[in-house]
Amino acid sequence: MIKELYLSYFENKKVTVMGLGLLGRGIGDTKFLAENGADIIVTDKKTKEQLMSSLESLKNNIEEPYVNIKYILGEHRLEDFENRDFILKAAGVPFDSEYIEHACSNKIPVYMSAALVCDIVMKELPDVVIIGVTGTRGKSTTTEMIAHVLRENGSRVHLGGNIRGVANLPLLDEIEDGDFLVLELDSWQLQGFGDMKISPHIAVFTSFMDDHMNYYKNDKELYFNDKANIYRNQHAGDVLVASAQASSEIIMRGERVAILVPEQQHFDMKLIGEHNQVAGGLAYEVASQCGLDDESIRKSLATFSAVHGRLEDMGLFQKAKTTMGRDVGSPDSKSEFRGVRVFNDNNATTGDATNIALESVNNTFNKKPILIIGGTDKGLPIDELEKCLQKKTKAVIYLSGTGTDRISLNKEYKYDKLSDCISKAFELSEEGDIILFSPAFASFSKYFNNEYERGDEFVKEVQKYA
């Protein structure tokens, strides 16, 4: 976008950034605001020490701190939510935050970056097509799949929303009229769309299941209402594409909205599992709405690879190590084999997601995997998960955590460190076995700040067995 088109939104504006974080989105958005002349207060409950890596990244071209950023760390203060032009709120801020309520009581607008970008683009670049994808499960794969198909067929595509390491505001420097903006949108980011009363031109709803009940205080309807912002402010000519499961959830609540449910069909893809066929159907329908033909779409879907950490096939590993760290082939090694396949499903943070992964592996390979599972409790039902653990696994290795503690099954193999879980999985493996890492619980613990750190650790440790 030409800078003159958006500069007035930020230049000389007094902005409070609520939540800098460690994932890169807050860093990129803050940097963008600083470089476009905003007067910024960054406030985060994390301390300076906890945020050191983020603070080090917030420097200008001559590696000096921005003079127009003031930091309030380790706390929030009501005074920082007064006399500002707007608040930029990070995803995950409590919906009943006293600080946001204070800003609203002072008639200060509260924005979220993905929604703010879309609002500006809709006003300044009317020929940009905005595609938003939400859902409890499947949104990452569906988002990346749509972007892949469009790119493979010559379109300019920009990815944003809940994409690792991608800040939303800097996208304004890249988007041009006629481009596609494809956003993965979680329920928190969709709060921003509801506040601004906007929705994407093409909305995609992949699934709706129990999740984040610790945040929503066990109120499933609050969770659904945030998700529903994906379509509730669409206009004539806009489209809602939903899976059969998501469609039934929408209809059950009496929502008066036209829903396009893709017909069931099979796609030749690298991905395994019926849920990925559903994602393929959603991507196919969106691409069709964007003017692509059947052959072009199918050809592009066939070249799409799994998103990192989403039932990602890491391939065959040709040797293992014993729990004592000895290479296979040493005189007293007890395991010597070739060809153990590993799947990284790190982002499966609910029992439903892990159940789907187990079913996908069972059905595709006719084989029960050695499962690594465990983490922090999210307050979700685990009855079905326990049944699947008994029926669909060769062995289960547990990573300790509050969620793991809720599982009532025998935990013969339980470890504090992910590296020990992986070592035991390889030790138990035989030639042709499958190791599946599908945690079913959140990642927050003394070992991980977020699920991305957990996934990175898994990849690093598994590569030692290559």
Image (cartoon, grey):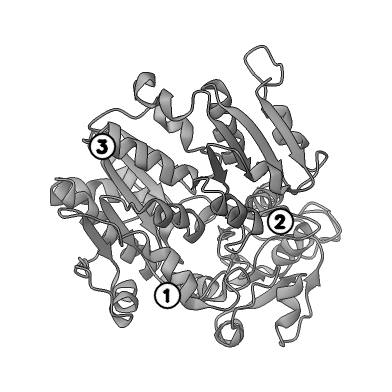
Q: Which residue position holds label 3?
A: 128
Residue 320: numbered disc = 2
Q: Position of residue 161 (x, y in %)?
A: 45, 46
Which dot, 1 or 2, sits closer to the camera? Answer: 1
The N terminus, quarter of image: top left
Q: Position of residue 49 (x, y in %)?
A: 83, 40
Kindly identify the amino acid type of the residue bearing the numbered disc 3: Val
Q: Which residue position holds label 1?
A: 363
Residue 273: numbered disc = none
The answer for how far apart the CA atoms under marks 3 and 1 are is: 41 Å
Looking at the image, tell me whether mark 2 or mark 3 is earlier in sequence order: 3
Looking at the image, tell me whether mark 3 or mark 1 is earlier in sequence order: 3
| Residue 430 appears left or right of 197 | right
Kindly identify the amino acid type of the residue bearing the numbered disc 2: Ala
Residue 390 found in image quarter? bottom right
Name the residue: 71% across, 21% down.
65
Q: Position of residue 371 (x, y in %)?
A: 63, 71
Which dot, 2 or 3, sits closer to the camera? Answer: 3
Instruction: Please report contact status of discs 3 and 1: CB closer than 8 Å, yes or no.
Output: no
